[in-house]
Amino acid sequence: MMVVAFSYFAWLAFSPINFLFGIPFATFPPAPLIIINSILYIPLIFLLIRRWLRTMMNRKGGPAAGIDTVEPGKAVAEPGDEWGTATRSYKAKAESKVTGSKSEIRGTPLTLDDGFFVKTPDMDTGQPLFDPEKLKARAMVKSKVSSGGWSDKRVSSRATGSLKASETEKHGRPTRSRRPHREISNIHLPSTLLATVLREGKNREGKGISIKAEDIRETVFSGKTPLTVILVIDVSLSMKRSMSEVRKLVERVERETRGSKDRVGIVAFKDSGAVEIQAPTTNWNKIYRSLARLRISGLTPLADALVKSLESIKRERMRNDLIEPLVIVISDFNPNIPLAQSVGPGHERYTPIRDLVRASRILRKQKVRVATVSVDYEQANFSKFLKRPFHDAMELAALLRMRKEGYNDIMETILSVPPFRKTFGAYIIARASGGHAFLSKELLNAQSVIGTILAAIESKTKMSVKNLREVKSYLQR
């Protein structure tokens, strides 16, 4: 206030307006000029103070001008505050990037409106992802199995699924009993009665037994149970350099599921949204015909692809509520198209990543297994540098940056750091959905693609403080 008052009187005495009316400098003007000078002084001092505050808040070191209201903790004065020479630097509080407006990975190249999402993606436009003639030839060879002209007993005689029944406790041959781990699916009656008798004792003549929750035992099965695999394939223009990786992954899935009771469906996405081009089926001839339709072009609506895969799973659950779903997303994970509901009135910014996180969390809530397979070669740098598998390397890098930036959540850290936000797309989905992220080369080198995915999702290993210490010591060498 003292500075404002002093500058006001100085302005009245030395204002150039006074000189225009013949008033000497260092002399107070008459009342009409005082009013004119005051009207000019108010906006000038307002702009000057605002510019000063912005300059002080943008400084990363040196005097912080005593702005106590932005200092952490209680607003306690420190030496130098009264003169604007406090040495504590200004540090703004970071806003949430998970639900904030600045959460897109890369800018949307088009001005979207509601009409953009009305159009169905044209799957027949662009460069073919698969060679239709080769797919047709493969379908013809496999069809000879039914006529006896060709057979592969090792595959066609499986007639089971890929998931171990002991993981679902619903199918297979009963082998033993155990205490329930999660929700009880099959009660093992003999073991339950035996546990009740052992608890209550033998001397109960003429009295019944009372089964309690602690006595219940569930059946453990052996064998295999079928999976419902939804292949979510990115056919946007950015996937052009990764076509061979996509083909190899699909061929490996075919090799491990063909001839079994596993059902496979295809969801493709580009341009304005995603399309289910093949409902889950065990008939690979149908899947070949669907794959022949895939063409590479357009944008990357990744969030809509997750929503479409969930819709496919819900339809399968209407047919059989005991299915075991697995969503495998094959992409370079650079989304630039949000969901349609994010472009309505009141949404000034497009938020593909915010929608991606929300869709992934819905999949987790619906108890859907999710695996993300990145075909981007540049993302292998984290694995090489940290000497760990792709998922663990991404999580470890995020934890290290989280400690450095002072955040409390891994997802918040990733979405707040621009380089991470552009390269951690696969891990973002895996983290939010409770799944696992893989590199395509890492997965193709495994003995079994489906088996590796299931084992990784079920293990759900997390980085610990010990891992952070090991990496820090490694980086300091």
Image (cartoon, helix red, strand yellow):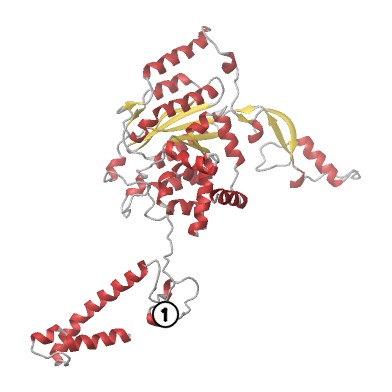
Residue 77 falls left or right of residue 8 = right
Is residue 232 visible in the rendered image? The answer is yes
Q: Residue at x 47, y 12 (%)?
A: 141
In the picture provided, is 341 more to the left or to the right than 115? right
381 or 191: nearer the viewer = 381
Task: Name the residue rendered at 8%, 87% in the picture.
Answer: 21
Q: Position of residue 9 (x, y in %)?
A: 23, 88
Is 418 on the left-hand or right-hand side of 386?
A: left
Q: Is residue 160 left or right of residue 7?
A: right
Residue drawn at 27 percent across, 44 percent down:
110
- The residue nearer to you, when weighing 155 against 65, is 65
Residue that badge 1 annotates? 81
- Disc 1 marks which amino acid? Asp
**As rendered, which of 283 and 396 lies closer to the eye?**
396
Q: Residues within 10 Å of mark 1 (few under 14, many from 20)?
A: some
Q: Is residue 307 above or below residue 65?
A: above
Residue at x 37% of width, y 16% of height: 133
Q: Secondary structure at mark 1?
A: helix
Say above or below: 440 vs 342: above
- Image coords of residue 378 (percent x, y): 42, 39
